[in-house]
Amino acid sequence: MRIFLCAAAIALLAGCQPALQRIAGTQAPAQVTLSQKALAGPVMRVQIASRGADAQLSRVAVKDDVETWLAVDNISLSFRHGVLVASRGLGFDLMGADANGTLAAFAGQGAPVYRRQMRYLTGDHHSTYLMAGCQMTVTGWEVVGGQRLERLEEKCRARQNSFTNIFWRDSSGFIVQSRQWISPEIGYLRSSIRKR
Amino acid sequence: MSNRLCRQGFAKTSVFAMIVCVPISLAAQERSIAWGYNSFGVPGMIDMPTAFGREDAELGFTTSHFKNQTRNTMTFQISERLSASFRYAILFDIRRDPGSAVLPDRYDRSFSLQYRFADEGRYRPAMAFGINDIVGTGIYGGEYVVASKTLTPRLRATAGLGWGRLGSYNGFSNPLGAVFGDGVKSRPLAEGGLGGSFDPDIWFRGDAAFFGGVEWQATDRVRLTAEYSSDDYAREDGSAFDRKSPFNFGVSYQYNDRTTLDLRYLYGSEIGVQLSYALNPKKPRFGSGLDSAPPPILPRVAGRGQEPVDLSGPGFARTARQALAREGVALDGLQADGKTLRIQIRNDRYATSVQAVGRAARVLTRIAPAYVDNFEIRLAAEGAPVTSVLLRRSDLERLEFHPVAPDLLRVKTRIVDAAESLPAINGRYPALTYGFEPYITPSLFDPDEPVRMDFGVALTGRFEPAPGLVFSGRVHQKIAGNLDKGTRESTSVLERVRSESYLYYKGGDTTIPELTGAYYFRPGGDLFGRVTAGYLESMFGGVSSELLWKPQNSRLALGAEVNYVKQRDFDQLFGFRDYETFTGHVSAYYEIGGGYFGQLDVGQYLAGDVGATLTLAREFDNGWRVGAFATVTDVSAADFGEGSFDKGIQLTVPLDWITGRPNKSKLNTVIRPVQRDGGARLKVSGRLYDRVRGLQATDIDATWGRFWR
């Protein structure tokens, strides 16, 4: 009995590749072919500690003020003026987020405590929202990666979660580096942009 | 640096490893959630229950063993208050009833229920009652009322009153006698014999006894339990083991959030072990899945893309077909109508059809010329259209990154019935596909060998000459297995429509379980039709026809199915046996709300018996389904044989829930305590209700958030 169960498992794993693929799910293309234009553009380096991931992303779409960046394994991140507003392909993805409060705080405007709305999907495919209350602090200039940048800390609380997003911007206000919270399960990503 | 955001090895880990090996931090020990499963697989301590239930929707699998006795239980927390269990126990050297002769072995199936009627308050304990053997042979027959209290966050105490088996040690005269009279002070023996008898008149009767215990959550992973058991094990004592004491002691080790190991010292003489694996359908390991990122929406830019494109020409259809195929969406038909572009699609990849619609819409924004303002995406199943989703392109462009995009888009989107097919694109028909896949055929609960199975390779083929017309077949080549070792001859006095399955298993190593031609069509609005002819299933061939009325947004659907079938030869090739019959049902399907589902089928079954099947299920919008069914027909319990009537449990697990990879397939399992000939239904592929509902507004709305996934 046990012997042939093992045999069955081995046959499943080794023998029948196409069928196994069917069982394991439709394979996404392993590599995305990025367009010449995307490859020639700027590059974002992203690290996600909880995944042990470290990747270079290319910018594949710009719509109004939202830029979408893609990794070769077909995971995308979208930023509005440097503030993360969506991720796709990570599992516990940020489906959408509002950046208005954060952007106003960058400009030194708006209320001292503001709301951030973040959308997720539950395990049974329903939309669910985290409403965070956030506060921005400018902590001063520091040298990061050879560049003199201004550091801003956004402290947020949403239900049982509290997180601190950190942004480093240059003198023009452009977000060069950041540490931003994606979701309770994934935690933070770190991003840094450099021109190619 | 690997250039991948998802670690490479992560995606390639085998399915099996993923189920077992992903480490997750322990779930918080919540108030009012039972800390473990007892040896009967019921939320409880060691042998005794507690009043707490497990987390809503949890599905627990336990296997518990001590001297001469193994209990395997599946328990489903149907709601926050109610749980149900199915148990399969193997017992050696046991007496049928206390004092009767010792039997060498016994295979016992039982269903049990536990209901918490009072939640824990500041001072009030949680209170529950339970029945351990609802329709069985009564070996585990026992009932209880139990109260549990959390004393400190790490310490709980439980006290209860048991009847039947749970009132057998240190019992006293039934206190219910004060209310219901002396009649309840004696407990008749369960009828036993065939099993399946429903004996509510013996519940809570006879002597009662106290039981109790304490649980101490010593660390986050280790729990110590001591209990006083009111079960005297009179059926086992002296033959299977020696019961010396009413006290049991246990240590539980929570290996991860799903797996717990228990080690116990039982009744002053025996060591017991238990493995529990509990999962919650609402909590997939991979969240919303590892599906690749969708293509970004491409907004129209003034002055660009205005050049005329012949949307009706083969060039555009080819472009669309390729672009959609990259997203796992198959293009069946296409029609341009002024500023509206219509496409008819099949979803080949995603568990929810709304995700296919979302991907298709994104693709259309990238390929449609700028003057196209509206998209209509028509969802089809088996070539027959079901639903139209009408979207405005400007909404897609405006809402892609909006924080509440799903709600805002849904308001602007119309979802309606689509009875007409769009003109098929060039090259869609005829279509031929084929492939190989492994198969496993299990057989459970034969006392000679409780688990048997065959496995082998299946060749599948499918030919579609025209919309809605599908010829398909399967050929099985057995590689190994022991299903043909079954020797239990059928004792059935009915037509042997199912009980001779062992002869089919012996019939041959190369079989054709299915070879059919089917036509799927739309006879009118909200109506769906199917006619299937050929070798419908491994034991029957013939003609099957079905009509379904299922409007969009309706909780109720009605169906009728009429079949004329002939029994197939045991070799499952082309020949037939003599038996032929009409079988068919009228069916009502009803979505009760809150994820609960009911179905009633009334009609004539395969053996010619007439009756009805009631199915109740809890369904999750991610495709999980846990259900139970029972069939009562005009066949008497004696003629039916073991089990008295047909009943069972249905379990559906979506594959993408396990793997995190997009996949439409689901694992379907039906567990019957025993398969007899009464109440047996034809197993024909392509039944309409399940094909249609996933493409309709109710399901689309429930999972609408995945439009943007």
Image (cartoon, rainbow, N blue to C red):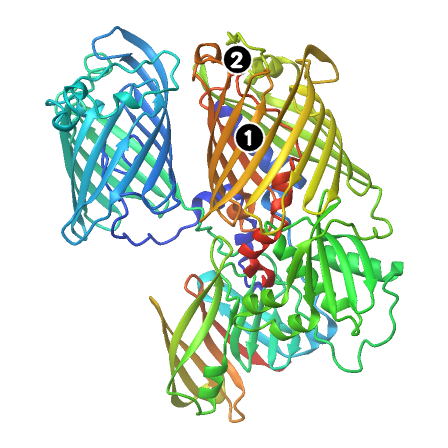
Disc 2 vs disc 1: which is toward the camera?
A: 1
- How many numbered callouts? 2
In the image, taking residue B691 as reference, residue B64 lies left or right, namely left
Residue at the spot of label 2: B486
Question: Mark 2 or mark 1, which has the lower sequence index?
Answer: 2
Residue B314: x %, y % from top left: 88, 58
Can residue B374 be seen?
Answer: yes
In the image, taking residue A171 as reference, residue B384 lies left or right, namely right
Q: Is residue B284 above or below residue B159?
A: below
Residue at the spot of label 1: B601
B462 and B19: which is toward the camera: B462
Q: CA distance from mark 2 to mark 1?
A: 32 Å
Residue drawn at x 52%, y 72% is B403
In the image, taking residue B176 as reference, residue B658 lies left or right, namely right
In the image, taking residue A182 as reference, residue B311 lies left or right, namely right
B405 and B416: which is toward the camera: B416
Screen quadrant of the C terminus of chain A:
bottom right
Badge 2: chain ID: B
Q: Is residue A71 above or below residue A154?
A: above
Identified by mark 1, the residue type is Asp
Give the secondary structure at mark 2: loop
- Residue A150 - label: none
Residue drawn at x 33%, y 14% is B192
Please report contact status of discs 2 and 1: CB closer than 8 Å, yes or no.
no
Crowd band around label 2 with a 10 angstrom C-alpha radius: few (<14), some (14–19), many (20+): some
B372 and A81: which is toward the camera: B372
